[in-house]
Image (cartoon, coloured by chain):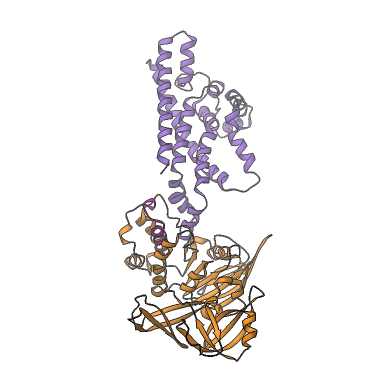
Amino acid sequence: MTPSDLTAVWLTLKLAGLTTLILLLIATPIAWWLARTRSFWKRPVAAVVNLPLVLPPTVLGFYLLLVMGPEGPVGQLTQAIGLGRLPFTFWGLVVGSVLFSFPFAVQPIQNAFEAMGERPMEVAATLRAGFRDRFFSVAVPLAKPGFLTAIVLAFAHTVGEFGVVLMLGGNIPGETQVVSVAIYNHVEAMEYGPAHLLAGTMVAFSFLVLLSLNLLGRRRAP
Amino acid sequence: MTIRARFRLDRGEFSLDVDLDLPGRGVTALFGPSGSGKTTLLRLIAGLDRAPGHLEVNGEVWQDDGRDLFLPTHKRALGYVFQEASLFPHLNARRNLEYGLKRVPADERRVDMDHVLDLLGIGHLLERRPDRLSGGERQRVAIARALLTSPRILLMDEPLAALDLARKQEILPYLERLHDEMETPILYVSHAPDEVARLADHIVALDNGRAIAEGPLAATLARLDLPIRLGEDAGVVIDATIGARDEAWHLIRADFAGGGLWVRDTGHAIGHRVRVRILARDVSLALEHPRDTSIINLLPGTVAELAVDNHPALALVRVEVDGTAIVARLTRRSVAALGLAPGKPVWVQVKAVALVG
């Protein structure tokens, strides 16, 4: 692998890791709310969360570019507080990836919270555990398979994204050039050898992801 | 030492309106058919659900709408046993037990772990995970888990309903020991008359979200307006002591204020306190001492009250046997033929007696 390819691999892993971490922090409370609420807003919020499932990545990338651009509301905010502009930076990619993989993190966790039912948390309350205490000592352990699925899916989905990256980040080596984009570059330049190497790595990675998901699902059954 | 609970709840098709003053010791049964509001009331007391009202448990106010006070469940010193054991599946039996225990400040722990393990016979199960326990064992661990939080009150929501008969028979003796050995008052929700007869000291009969009768168990069961709702299970409960044993015929005699009742020898020692249950349908009345009858339990008494039963052919008759009430279910034709009326002396023939604990 060329040094620039290795840089792309490292960048991709860093992006996927950070995205997964941020997603866990944001998706967990939203998943809990969606699993428990009887509010009228449940369905509209769920629809918004799931939008990236059906939107073409280019559409998402296009709007993010506008919103985070110099004239966009988020862009003006980030400039005002001294963060500069996000498009065509690594952190811009992180924002895009988080939104793009949102449903992949929310849904498994929400399903696990729903499958758990109200009872374990009620039992914990009668055993003197306050909300935060019982959330971490009961809800999170019981929803563990959901969390693991969310982690694997969010990570893998981020590794595999292409459209959002291209729209939002472009093709800057070491900053926004991830593996999927690097493969595209190699093919464009008729460098089939390096393209094969990276593409083959992606196939192996994807296989391992699906295998581990399968094993996680099996372990869930008693 | 009392529990005062006043709640008013209106959910359209279901409403609850109770104002109860319950004893702060012993077992109080919340008894009634499904949909009568028993579980709802228990959940309101636990703070798992909320309705306008006022709640005070042994001097501590848990809910007072006037002062906008509502203690969340985890701040109430209560134990709750659900219908299904609801052990945490990710923790073994020991860590399930410790879950509540370690959340109670050390200086508030009054219940000894070893005592509870022994009381419920679960000492050998501690390292097992819940899915390696039988239904009865799970429920015993769940009861122990609740007790270990040193609750001021133990709330039990039909703890036996999800178990088969054999498992029920397995747990009932433990519940009796609980009753005998723990100071903690127990509110026990049940729709099973035999459980109530066996365990309760005090009963609140609920119907349609209203308390239709309330009082000490024996006196309340002897009321003729309540048996109507109990249907086939109408009957009385009498506290007695084993007074004699007839080795030849394998019988023992349960003595109470009004006399003695011979029952099958259950192996209880002389002097042992037992509870005897007599169903109204197993009692008949005669004006003179019957002769040449197969019934061995004959007691002299006086008719105290008559009422029409749930079918126009049937009547319920309360007979006082030296201060102890026994209820008989007769046809109204028999009532007329014998000329039964309050004050009339009769012989009570008891066909079947059950020792319940």
Closer to the camera in the image, A14 or B20: B20
**Figure check: A88 above or below B261:** above
* Residue range highlighted in magenta: B128-142
Q: Is residue B129 magenta?
A: yes
Closer to the camera in the image, A217 or B195: B195
The C terminus of chain B: image quadrant: bottom left
**Figure check: B144 above or below B311:** above
The extreme left residue here reads B124
Residue B218 x/y as whole percent = 52, 80
Residue found 57% across the figure and 64% down from its top? B44
Could you say which chain is coloured orange in the image? Answer: B
The hue used for chain A is purple
The extreme top residue here reads A190
Residue B14 x/y as whole percent = 66, 62
In the rendered image, is residue B6 in sight?
no
The extreme right residue here reads B12
**Figure check: A57 above or below B110:** above
**Figure check: B107 above or below B125:** below
Residue B157 x/y as whole percent = 50, 63
Residue found 55% across the figure and 84% down from its top? B285
Q: Quadrant of residue B286?
A: bottom right
Residue A218 x/y as whole percent = 41, 37
In the rendered image, is residue B316 in sight?
yes
Residue found 62% across the figure and 29% down from its top? A67
